[in-house]
Image (cartoon, grey):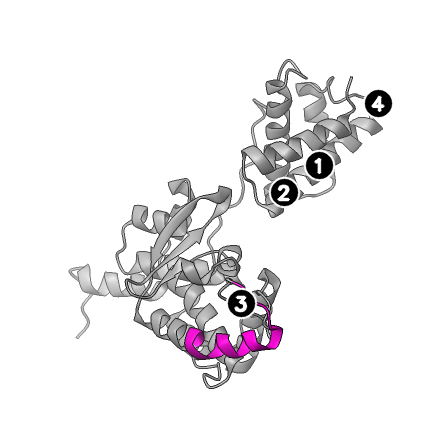
Amino acid sequence: MKRAEQYVQEFKSYLQVEKHASPHTVYYYLNDVNFFLEFLLSESISFEQADPAVVRVFLTKLYEKKLSRRTVSRKISSLRSFYKFLEREDVVAANPFLRLVQPKAPAYVPSFLYEQELEKLFEASDLEAPLGQRDQAILECLYGTGMRVSECAGITIDDVDLSIGTVLVRGKGRKERYVPFGSFMEKAFRRYLQDGRERLLEKSKEETGKLFLNSRGKPITERGIRLILNKLVEQSAVHMHLHPHKLRHTFATHMLNEGADLRAVQELLGHEHLSSTQIYTHVTKDRLRTIYMNTHPRANRE
């Protein structure tokens, strides 16, 4: 009989090869599975013996640790997938997590930037310097397309078609989508490709197809993009916490606030389920006020 660790490794391969899960997802799934296996070991129970009663005890332990409902929900989801895999492999007869009701996560409203805040960020880069041109192109890319930071770091020169204004984005699960972009992003890309990128590439003396390069002329990393955004915040003297996903939130919010169709935004973001996009249907207070003043019969003030 195989040991639990062997099945965990097989589950890892399943996530990577069959589900095309991201390294981030694989890390958390395995972390959650190993956490449960340690619990079973402390209770002298094998992973094949886990049943709904054992799972309820485990759930109690999670709440005793004062974990958030979101974290508990994620662990349950990870373990449900693990036992679904074991069931498929005929290792267990039933999935003990199948009928477990996940704790309801608190309502989540993503934060976003107002246009005035964005303008200060777009004015922060030195467009005469190679790094400034690159930073501006990255900022335009994240806000102009709503792509994830991993997708942005992975763009190649061949993915970008400046003639028709589209970029090929490789998303989660190796799914590809074409996303259009406008004149501001096109201008930033042309400036960077014709000048800044060439000067950065000279520093490494190595050819690469990746679009965005670091200060040494090597392909930029996700961490590198996050550091660039932090630098732009400092240069613009705005007080905010800026991360790449906040620009994705901003893209979706601004699109929907201006009347974009929900399913169109879903496709642009690369969401598999519409429910993932619906969290952006909140509107700003300014827009609510504008709608009210323009539509309510007794809203007009003399």
User: Does label 1 or label 2 sit earlier along the sequence?
Assistant: 1
Q: Specify the segment rendered in magenta.
A: 192-208
Please name the amino acid that badge 2 sits on: Thr
Name the outermost residue toward the bottom. Answer: 128
Q: Is residue 24 visible?
A: yes
Instruction: State how far apart marks 1 and 3 are (Cα).
Output: 31 Å
Q: Is residue 45 above or below residue 182?
A: above
Q: Earlier in the sequence, mark 3 or mark 2?
A: 2
Image coordinates of residue 37 in percent, x first then y, are 76, 30
Q: Which SS class for mark 3?
A: loop
| Cα–Cα gap, marks 4 and 3 | 46 Å
Circle 4: residue type: Ser
Question: Dot 1: what SS?
Answer: helix
The Cα atoms of the two marked residues, 4 and 2, are separated by 25 Å
Mark 2 nearby-residue class (10 Å; few <14, some 14–19, many ≥20): some
Residues at marks 1 and 2, CA–CA distance in whole angstroms: 9 Å
Residue at image point 58% right, 72% down: 217
Q: Which residue is mark 1?
A: 62
Mark whose residue sits in front, 1 or 3? 3
Q: Nearer the viewer, residue 280 or 260?
A: 260
Q: Return the residue at label 3.
A: 242
Q: Would you say 221 lies left or right of 249 here?
A: right
Distance of mark 3 from mark 2, alpha carbons? Answer: 23 Å
Q: Residue at x 64, y 38 (%)?
A: 29
Amino acid, disc 3: Leu
